Image (tube, rainbow, N blue to C red):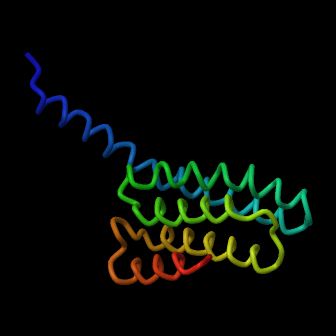
Amino acid sequence: MVSLQDDYEKAMDVLADLAQEYEKWVRADLQRLQAAFEQAEVLDGEKRTHLIQTDLFRVAHDMKGQGATFDYELVTQIGNHLCRYVERKSFFGPAEMEAVSKHIQALAFVIDHRLTGDGGAEGQKLAAQIEGIT
């Protein structure tokens, strides 16, 4: 008979294997996020807003959903903040684009420096800066 402990250990083994792949996935997501941002930069008005609220939002939403599963709590936190920011805006001029860019830069920093968990003091300082973007 298989115990709950055995099932739990198997599930943890599967997650550990997937965690090794997560870094590849999150880097690919980050590239897609940056590409959507770069596409939006050359647009203006409704076209820019639409691209940010669809393509960019979708990638940020995926990133936030996967981050905590693989102990990248800051990816989830920053991705969530970016999603909420995008939802609140109806126009993306220079100031809004700068705010979106800061979110993307923060995500890149977390990923490049492998800031897992809450990211320690460095991660918490970064998170506080992002939370200050309104």
Residue at coordinates 74% horizontally, 54% vertically from top-left?
A: 53
Q: How many numbered circles are shown?
A: 0
In the rendered image, residue 90, in percent from the top left (x then y), is placed at 79, 62
Q: Quadrant of residue 73?
A: bottom left
Residue at the image point whose x is 46% and y is 80% from the top: 128
Residue 114, image quadrant: bottom left
**Image coords of residue 58 (percent x, y):** 66, 49
Horizontal relation, residue 99 to residue 45: left or right: left
Task: Decide if residue 25 is on the left or right side of residue 45.
Answer: left
Q: Residue at x 45, y 74 (%)?
A: 113
- For the N terminus, the quadrant is top left
Measured from the top left, where is residue 9 in percent x and y?
Answer: 18, 37
Which of the two residues, 113 or 46, is positioned nearer the viewer here? 46
Q: Position of residue 17 (x, y in %)?
A: 35, 43
The relative height of residue 7 versus residue 128 in the rendered view (above or below) is above
Picture quadrant of residue 27: bottom right
Rendered view: 51 above or below 81: above
Classify residue 4 as left or right of residue 112.
Answer: left
Q: Is residue 109 above or below residue 60?
A: below
Q: Quadrant of the C terminus?
A: bottom right
